[in-house]
Each structure stands twice: as structure tokens, then as C-alpha cells.
Amino acid sequence: MIGLHPTSVGEDVNEQLKVLEKALTNTKFYAIGEIGIDLYWDKTFIDAQISAFRTQLDWAKHLNLPVVIHTREAFPLILDLVKEAQDGSLTGVFHCFTGSESDAERIMDMNFMMGIGGVVTYKKSYLPEVLQHVPLDFMVLETDSPYLPPVPHRGKRNESSYMTETALKLAEIKGVSMEEIAMMTTRNAQKLFKISSL
Ligand SMILES: [Zn+2]
């Protein structure tokens, strides 16, 4: 995928977007991302972050591509922006979802998915409680590698093979087998990114 990450939005945002727009016409991509709003590191370019996000949501609609959304300290702003752009054709995932139950409800109302990563295995995480109320149809698994490794690998560099720990935890939360989690989340990912089964 390709996208202008919110923490990379700078004064030359229009130039940055032009480079990406050109790349999108030249190469096959499966998604536009990570795009979104990040107010944790820096709020200086909040207006530019918003306009870059809107522009890239438009591209996604025109190109019929899903979006992968990165958001930090920006709920509910990000939900309002996606809602504003949602004409029924937009699809995507809120990556590394760590929101509340009402955030999850708004995401499902917009027919978006939630990316579940290592955070769900963390002792202090509220995510297990929230995910009890979210049907598996709205979840895909992710690593966010090299960040956010699941328990018992915390402190190490995250990698794809650790995803079994995340799947195991999710199986426990939903009261189903790990195979069921693997099957459902694989199916969801294939549908979202329009990739046929191997
Ligand atoms: Zn991210």
C-alpha cells in the first residue's frame, strides 16, 4: 500500500501528495495507507493532516481501494471525517484499534473493520472487553511490526510469527477455536484487500 502518513505531513503537503498520486497511477496497489490523523506527536499541521486525509479518501473512492487508517489521540475527529466521506463505497480498516465500545460501534456503522494486534494481549488493555461486543466479521489481525509485540514477546522486535499469540487471545475472548479465528480473519482480509485465496 501507499499513503501519506499523518506524522509525515509537512509544510510541503501538496508536493508530497503529488508524488503519491503519480505513484498510484503507475503501480498496482492493494490499499491506500497508512493515512489518518495523529495528534500525539505534533499538532502543528493539524489542518494539513485533515486535508491530506480527505484528499486520500477521495483517491480511495475513485480507485476503488480500501484505506488503512492510523489514528492517535484523534477519536472522534477521525470518525467524523470518515463518516463525511462515506458514500457507501469506501472500505477500510482502523489499524491497531484500541478504541472504546462506542468507537467500535461507529466503525461498524460505517462498514469499516478493526485491525487487532498485540495490544489485545496486554494486561492493562480494555480491548478484550470491547471486542466481546464486536462480531468477528469486523476484525482482521495485524502485527504493526516492528512495534507492539504480543505477550510473551514484549520488548522484542515484533514479527509475523508472533501473530499466533494475538489469535490465541482473540480465540479466548470470543470463545471459539484458534482455527476459527484464523479462518475468519483471513477471509476478512482477502475480502477487504480483494485478494483471492491461495
Ligand atoms: Zn500506524
Image (spheres, rainbow, N blue to C red):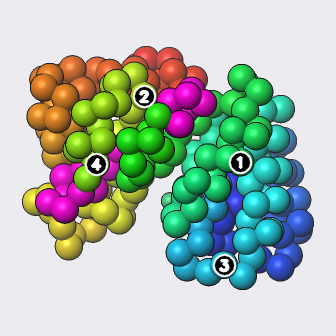
Residue type, label 2: Phe
Query: Exactly how many numbered labels are in the figure?
Result: 4
Q: Residue at x 68, y 47 (%)?
A: 80
Among numbered discs 1 and 4, the one appearing first in the sequence: 1
Residue under the point 24% across and 26% down:
181
Q: Earlier in the sequence, mark 1 or mark 3?
A: 3
Q: Residues within 10 Å of mark 2 (few under 14, many from 20)?
A: some
Q: Tell me the SS state at disc 1.
A: helix
Highlighted range, magenta: 106-125
Q: Nearer the viewer, residue 195 or 53?
A: 53
Percent x, y of residue 168: 14, 38
Q: Amino acid at mark 3?
A: Lys
Q: Earlier in the sequence, mark 4 or mark 3?
A: 3
Task: Identify the mark at residue 43; answer none if there is no mark.
Answer: 3
Q: Decide which of tag 4 and tag 2 comes sooner along the chain.
A: 4
Can you identify the residue that label 1 sits on? 81
Label 2, secondary structure: give it.
helix
Task: From the image, state whether disc 4 or disc 2 is nearer to you.
Answer: 4
Horizontally, is 63 left or right of 179 in the view? right
Tell me the residue that label 2 is attached to.
138
